[in-house]
Amino acid sequence: GQNKMAHLGPLNNGIGRYTCQLKRLTFDFCRNGGSSKGLRKYIDSSLVDVCKKNTSVAVYVRHIRGRHPRIIGVFLNGNSRIVSVKNLEPKEISEHVQRLLMSSGAKPEKLRKWWHTDRPSIQGNWNPFLNN
């Protein structure tokens, strides 16, 4: 018999099955506060569409009196990200929501370039003070 894997097409590297890593979105706002005006407009105009397009994400809207508005994203890996949307317009809030929806939730890691070579130079390593 032939190998079963030979009948399958090439792997799409995640193109065919994207899984949104965002588990929950929470919108905190004040009903009367001026800094929450943009978030209130966003909730009235765009939030239902976001919920329909992203059925795997639980969406909560909380009224918190006297606090600046914010969006809290909780990811499948347990990490959370808090975005302040104080005094922002609905278009800017939409960009933040899209960024959270497309994010992996992984903490940013510092990239270090520890280099290694199998054939080190016989002359030694170069440094900026070598020829002074």
Image: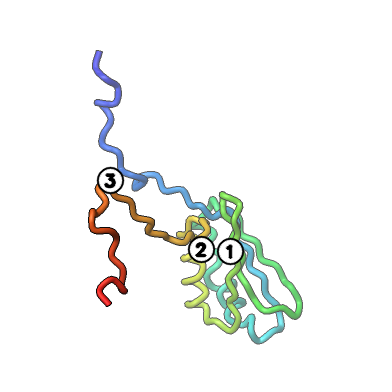
Question: For the residue carrying disc 2, how many other residues have a C-alpha within 10 Å: few (<14), some (14-19), or many (20+)?
Answer: many
User: What SS does tag 1 mark?
Assistant: strand
Toward the viewer: 6 or 124? 124
Question: For the residue carrying disc 3, how many other residues have a C-alpha within 10 Å: few (<14), some (14-19), or many (20+)?
Answer: few
Which numbered disc flags the more N-terminal residue, 1 or 3? 1
**What residue is pinned by disc 3?**
118
Q: Amino acid at mark 3?
A: Asp
Residues under labels 2 and 3: Cα distance? 42 Å
In this rendering, the label closer to the viewer, 1 or 2: 1
For image coordinates 24% across by 54% down, the residue present is 121
**What residue is pinned by disc 2?**
100
Residue 8 drawn at (x, y percent): 28, 30
Q: Please say if the residues under marks 1 and 2 sit with CB atoms less than 8 Å apart.
A: yes
Q: Please say if the residues under marks 2 and 3 sit with CB atoms less than 8 Å apart.
A: no
Q: Amino acid at mark 2?
A: Leu
Q: Is residue 8 above or below residue 130?
A: above
User: What SS does tag 3 mark?
Assistant: loop
**What residue is pinned by disc 1?**
81
Q: Amino acid at mark 1?
A: Arg
Which numbered disc flags the more N-terminal residue, 1 or 2? 1
Residue 108 drawn at (x, y percent): 49, 61
Toward the viewer: 125 or 63? 125
For image coordinates 61% across by 52% down, the residue present is 78
Q: Please say if the residues under marks 1 and 3 sit with CB atoms less than 8 Å apart.
A: no
Q: How many numbered discs, if any?
A: 3
